[in-house]
Image: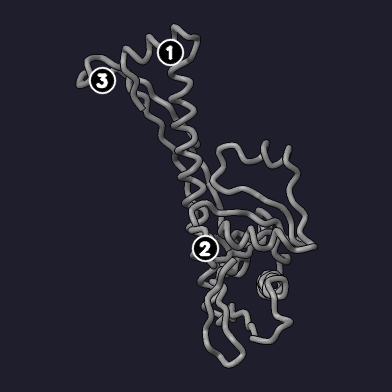
Amino acid sequence: GEITREQFQDMTSYGYDPYGFINAILTNECSQRINFDILKALHTLGKKHADAINFNAKIVVSDVLHENSLTIQKQVVSKFNLASNIISTRSRVSPADWVVVGAGIGTAIMDMPTFMATPATTFAAASGNNAIYCIGNIGRLKVYIDPYLEFDSTSCLVGAVGTEQSPGLKFMPYILADQVTYPSEALGGQNLVSMTSRYAIAPAGAHPESLYLGFNLKLAKVDGVEATFEA
């Protein structure tokens, strides 16, 4: 990040800390990148698990009159519960604790009677600069929205937290945020602020993918014809 002499003068004259603003921006960018890398690694492991067991992510719908949005929503939640039970059985660690979905799927399951929304005060305090945020609980599963997914994305990722000793994806930070401020000759002596972050994200243990299951929901009619999913 960089700041010109004029910007520095204007901001300080009104009581603002220009380097504080730059530090906040760079810290946010670092945290967003870390969250993005973790989610990408989790989706990779979840897809690997789903492919290994040929997980069926189809939701069957019919043209009869009793079919409505609520019955489809229940089938979506049933897929989450199925994934949770598979994780519990295959990992032998624990059932799933969380599910990550796009905004469309998240909005759809918020209409479920069993959905418990996150209180507004808790939501505001927990969101902050996080790239992923919890909207509530559906049964035992915490529901998180991934802002990197398209609104109409049907991607779902179900996973268990596990423990430090259990297999799974491990985040190993070395230096979360290292800031350096120095003058730049190319910019006439204006100060440049840089921030670096060093960390490792790696699957560890035997079959670490067994704690996660990733899939794309698909609608299919009874006769096998694929339909369009609309959250």
Above or below, comparing residue 197 to residue 188 in the picture: below
Residue 124 position in % (x across, y down): 67, 38
Q: Nearer the viewer, mark 2 or mark 3?
A: 2
Q: CA distance from mark 1 to mark 2?
A: 41 Å
Q: Identify the amino acid type marked 3.
A: Ser
Dot 2 or dot 3, earlier in sequence: 2
127 sits to left or right of 13: right
Q: CA distance from mark 3 to mark 1?
A: 20 Å
* Extreme residue in the front direction: 65
- Residue that appears at 48% across and 15% down: 17
Which numbered dot is residue 152? 2
Residue bearing mark 3: 184
Which numbered dot is residue 11? 1
Question: Are circles 2 and 3 on residues that touch, CB within 8 Å?
Answer: no
- Residue that appears at 37% across and 9% down: 9
Q: Secondary structure at mark 1?
A: helix
Other-residue count near label 3 (Cα within 10 Å), few / some / many at <14 / 14–19 / ≥20: few
- Residue that appears at 52% across and 78% down: 51
* Extreme residue in the bottom direction: 223
Q: Nearer the viewer, mark 3 or mark 1?
A: 1
**Color encoding of the figure:** one colour
